Structure formats: C-alpha cells, structure tokens
Amino acid sequence: MSDIVIRVENLGKRYEIGHLDPTGYRTGLRHAIQDALTAPFRRLTGDRGSEASRKRAAREVFWALRAIDFEVRRGDVVGVIGRNGAGKSTLLKILSRITEPTIGRIGLKGRVASLLEVGTGFHPELTGRENIYLNGAILGMSRAEVKSKFDEIVAFSGVEKFLDTPVKRYSSGMYVRLAFSVAAHLEPEILIIDEVLAVGDSEFQKKCLGKMRDVASDGRTVLFVSHNMAAVAALCSETLLMDRGGLHFAGGVEAGITAYRNLVSSQVDRWRWSSGPGREIGNERIALRAVTVEPVDPMQDRESTSTALKVVIDYEVLAVLSGVTPFLFLVDDLGTEIFNSVDLPSAVATPDRFLMGDLQPGHYRSVCTLPGDFLNEREYGIKVGFNTSGTHFEFVSREILRICFAQTQTMRAEYSGRWPGMIRPRLGWVSAPRCSEDVSDLHERTERGDARIS
C-alpha cells in the first residue's frame, strides 16, 4: 500500500479583486441626485459609464496559488515556509476543505484536523467543555472517543478553571491552547497547523512542539506553517517553500531554510528601510516610517565588527499615547531572536508598572547604539516594534533590514579562525599569576594599569 497521504496536482486558486475607479468615485446625496437626473441623457447618448458598470469593469484576476504539485508521505513533518502573502494559508485552507481550488486536485488519505486561526471550529456561546465535544464531532469522533481523551486535552490546555466558561470570554492565548489540545489529542491522521501558535506563550509553544513530535512519531503526518526557522529546523523533516503563489522549493529542511533565507535576503533592504505604498507598517495609533543603521563615527566602515553603529528609528504617533516605547530585535539567519533592546529613557520602574508621560500626535525619532567589537562576522536581521503603557504591544514588524559584518585586522590578530557564536563581544580581562597576589591587589593594579589586560 502506498505511503502517500497527501497528493497535490496542478493546484490553483483564483480570486477576483474589485477596484473602485478613482475617477468615478462619487459619494453623498448631491452626487446621487445628479446621477439620477443625468441618467436619461446618458441612455440617449449611449453612455453606459454608470458607477455600477465602472465598478464591474475595474476587476483584477489574482492567482493566490498556481501550478502547485507535491506529495507528502505518512509520518512526515513538513514545514510550509515563505514570506507573508506567498500562499501558505490559502494552501492549508484548501487541504483542510475550507475552500475549493479553482483548478487541479488534491488527494487526502485519512482524517484531517486543522488549526488555522484562533478559535477555529469553536462556538463562542458554548463553554470550553462543550466545544471539546463539538470539535470532536466535527473531526468525526464519537462521544466515547472524545470522552476517553477528555482529561488529557484539559490537562494539556491548562484551562481547567475556565472549562465551564463560554469561550467568548477566553483570551486569544486560552483559545489557542484549548484548540490545539483538541486538534492534537483526537488522533487525526493528518494534523495541519498554521502559525496561530505564535499567540501562545513560550512555555506553551514548547509543549506544542513536543506534542507535534509525539504525533509524528506515531506515524501521523504534520503540516506546520511558521516564520520561525529555528522551530522548523527542530521539528520538520521536509519543507515546502512558497513564493508568490508558486512552489519555489520542495525538499530537505536544511536546504529549504537556506533557500528561504536566500529568497528573503534578496528582497530585504540593507542598512536602510523606509515606508511607502505597500510597505506601511503600523496601526491606527502608531506607524513606523523609517529605520536606518549607520556608523556613530561617519569616518568608520559600517561593515566592520569594530565599528559602533546607531539604529535610527523614525515613527509617527497618530493619537495621544501613554508610554510609547520603541524596541528592536536582532535575529539570526533562522529568525531566532538573539536579543532585544527597549527604549525606556523616561520610564520610572515600579514593582507593578512603568510610569511614563503622554506623547502627542507627531513625528518622533529614537536612536539605539550597538557598541563596536560586539557583533560577529555574519549577517543579522532587524525587527522593530512598539509597546505602550509599559505592557501593551502595539505591533512588531517583520524583518525589515539586514546588516552584514566582516572581521577587522585587530580582531584577526587575536585569532585567525572563525569565531563561533551569534555575537562576539570584546570584553575586558585581567591576568596575573595566582600565587603572587590576591584578588584585591589585582584589582588595584588593574586600576593603575599595571596588570596585563587582554
């Protein structure tokens, strides 16, 4: 018997997008009366350019997926990766039977459980307990089967105290925990997970990854969409790289991640990013306008590991906000966060909150300094975000900038090989024979500059 549990052949999904003709956009009572009065004359002259016909004419055909072919074997854990808008979620919706393809066909062997967005398959008016049984029924499980797994589902989700509370009162994190628990414990042959796991906390994400490994070890198949390449590398055995609605790569996880990073790197700005049509990042309260990385000393080489850099963040506050705090993440080639830094110059920290002043609408700039002799010889990605009132995250950008460094002759003189690690800080060291002096004397000599510092 064949081990192929998912077969996709020439799959395509087409949408029609309507556009309003800006030259024909009309609004208000005056324009409505004007259209009604001029309609007889337009008919006499053969002018059919009514607003409705203009709207119908201004339509665009958009292929979210085109010519997709692949196979997945039983027990494979497949990472579906790609940039936002590449077609990953559309593909999963078709595989989950939520939407129908325009062309092509799919073959699925076994029961499919999917978790594509927060609260998928939940009824907001029902309690957590009732939704467990409802989800089980949707997945084709009998009441006895759901009951046998009920305690495991509840224990894994961690929502025991709120089991008899309507899920409309759950937080997004509680939604995800319960929904994932149901999907993973009811033993589907194929488990499809979109990046909703990003809503949960880090502890729960680790539990989810462990559970998906258990599911795969039982011979079941997992399709996992994620932008976290570290999670994909740790969990998956195969990758599908999507780009602009097509399948860019299908194969091993290491080669897939490399192809993804190469694809992203070719489309990400280096050293400077600015907003514009189609590149806007933000919400109705705050918007990111530009991010620039440049040397603190303009005479120094910005690509040298010894050069101190400043990250200049320009942003616009669109409403009166309390405690606006920009922050940045430095990420590695897998998208793993190396560190983050937060701007809290005006904050007064207390045990339970930050006390910060209000910002009026307007343009602002924050600058973060990265010291020299700190980063290693490699490429890094930069993400920028904002929170308000000390605790509320407004948004975190995608990776919008990449910066690249080479070692200097000074550092090469110390060690000629390739230094391991994500960062390479040059720290102060003091050395002296242990038997000749005590620690306090060593510190005194260090202050005077007598001790050797390396």
Image: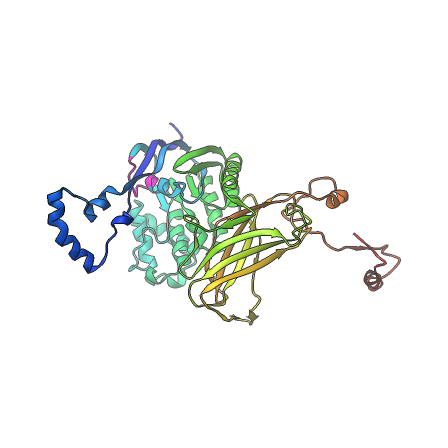
The percent position of residue 406, horizontal first and vertical second, equals 66, 42
Q: Relative to residue 452, is residue 22 drawn left or right?
A: left
Pick whichever, 348 or 140, lies toward us.
348
Percent position of residue 140, x then y: 30, 44
Residue 40 placement, left or right of 362: left
Quadrant assignment, res 15: top left
Q: Residue furthest right?
A: 436
Query: Where does the magenta region start and end?
Result: 94-102
Q: Front-most of 423 and 206?
A: 423
Does residue 422 appear to the left or right of 238 in the view shown?
right
Q: How many marks?
A: 0
Q: Main secondary structure of the magenta part?
A: loop
As drawn, 144 above or below 249: below
Residue occupying image coordinates x 23% and y 46%? 55
Rendered position, 362 above or below 20: below
User: Residue 242 or 209: which is nearer the viewer?
Assistant: 242
Q: From the viewer's perspective, tell me whether residue 10 is left or right of residue 389.
A: left
Tell me where residue 65 appears, x and y as whole percent: 35, 37
Residue 150, given in percent of the width and then of the height, sits at 37, 53
Classify the position of the N terminus by image quarter: top left
Within the magenta stretch, is there residue 191? Answer: no
Q: Is residue 288 above or below residue 360?
A: above
